[in-house]
Image: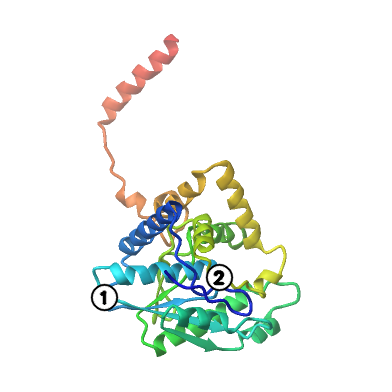
């Protein structure tokens, strides 16, 4: 059992592991879902060095924790390293993540870049910070992955994030796209993976509470009200309460796409349909006799 270690801010960096049956049921569920996602999309292979982007939020803590467990029990060998981008936000508790990672013997890097000031400067008045912030964050982390020789970059997005992104693009972007579980970055230098792709946010919330992770809130995006993503998340939570199977069905739809039933001319060759059509040519006299019979039947009615 771990002995508790408290910081001046009240964080418990090495809490005792939960022993309840509810915890082990949840852990088993998360391991199964993450394992299936890794298998289905071939996310991690022999010899991989997986860079886990950790922000101090519940999602990235859970991702790191589950991947470290897999590292110990998986039939393949791979390395896990945690990387945090310190964006120099005012009031950010810089000691929390290093303390947590060191106390739990997790290899890590802290990448220091003042993307906070750049985001504030480049974001127009009244607009949300997310677009600029995420672009700067991605650029910094992807470049650092190359520096340390990481073969995969693991992000903490879960199933509900993927669904929310789908609706954001549908409602506000005019496109049918979301967050794929596995992606080649636009510069083709990094493979991004989302091992939590099958995991529901409510299960991550429960797991983070049980494990007592030292959660650090985001004071940049979290300080802005009426974010479209926040509104969509509320909509999804309401759906989940009223129609428990709806989100499961929506995520299933993202895995079961029929290009010929949509309208994207780049995705499906509609012009070629005329060439692929199979005519069943009939003798003209035979067809005339059939039509006569049909006309007679209508006349009889």
**Where does the image place residue 255, in percent across and percent down from the top left?**
40, 54
Most distant residue in the right direction: 125
Tag of residue 57: 2
Give the residue at x 69% y 82%.
120
Q: Is residue 28 visible?
A: yes
Tag of residue 77: 1
Q: Is residue 233 left or right of residue 149?
A: right
Tag of residue 196: none
Of residue 246 and residue 261, the one placed in the foreground of this image is 246
The quarter of the rendered structure image containing the N terminus is bottom left
Distance of mark 1 from mark 2, alpha carbons?
Answer: 27 Å
Q: Is residue 25 left or right of residue 286?
A: right
On the image, which quarter does residue 268 sit in? bottom left
Label 1, residues with CA under 10 Å away: few <14, some 14-19, many ≥20? some
Q: Element at badge 2?
A: loop
Q: Is residue 137 left or right of residue 89?
A: left
Q: Is residue 44 visible?
A: no
Q: Is residue 86 left or right of residue 284?
A: right
């Amino acid at each position: 059992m771990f002995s508790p270690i408290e910081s001046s801010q009240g964080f418990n960096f090495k809490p005792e592991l939960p022993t309840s049956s509810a915890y082990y049921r949840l852990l088993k569920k998360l391991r199964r879902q993450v394992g299936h996602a890794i298998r289905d999309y071939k996310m991690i292979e022999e010899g991989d060095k997986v860079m886990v982007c950790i922000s101090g939020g519940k999602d990235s803590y859970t991702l790191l924790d589950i991947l470290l467990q897999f590292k110990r029990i998986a039939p393949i060998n791979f390395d896990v390293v945690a990387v945090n981008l310190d964006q120099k936000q005012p009031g950010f508790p810089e000691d929390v993540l290093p303390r947590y990672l060191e106390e739990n013997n997790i290899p890590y890097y802290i990448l220091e870049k003042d993307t906070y000031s750049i985001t504030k400067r480049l974001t127009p008045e009244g607009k949300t910070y997310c677009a600029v912030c995420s672009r700067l964050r991605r650029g910094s982390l992807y470049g650092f992955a190359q520096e340390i020789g990481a073969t995969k970059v693991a992000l903490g997005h879960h199933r509900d994030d993927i669904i929310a992104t789908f609706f954001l693009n549908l409602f506000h972007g005019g496109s049918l796209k979301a967050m794929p579980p596995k992606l080649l970055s636009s510069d083709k230098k990094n493979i991004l993976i989302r091992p939590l792709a099958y995991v529901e946010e409510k299960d991550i919330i429960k797991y983070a509470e049980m494990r007592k992770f030292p959660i650090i809130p985001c004071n940049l995006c979290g300080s802005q009200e009426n974010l479209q993503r926040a509104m969509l998340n509320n909509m999804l939570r309401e759906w989940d309460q009223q129609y428990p199977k709806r989100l499961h069905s929506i995520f299933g739809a993202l895995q079961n796409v029929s290009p010929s039933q949509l309208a994207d001319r780049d995705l499906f060759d509609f012009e070629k349909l005329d060439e692929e059509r199979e005519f069943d040519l009939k003798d003209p006299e035979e067809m005339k006799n059939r039509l006569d019979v049909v006309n007679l039947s209508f006349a009889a009615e």
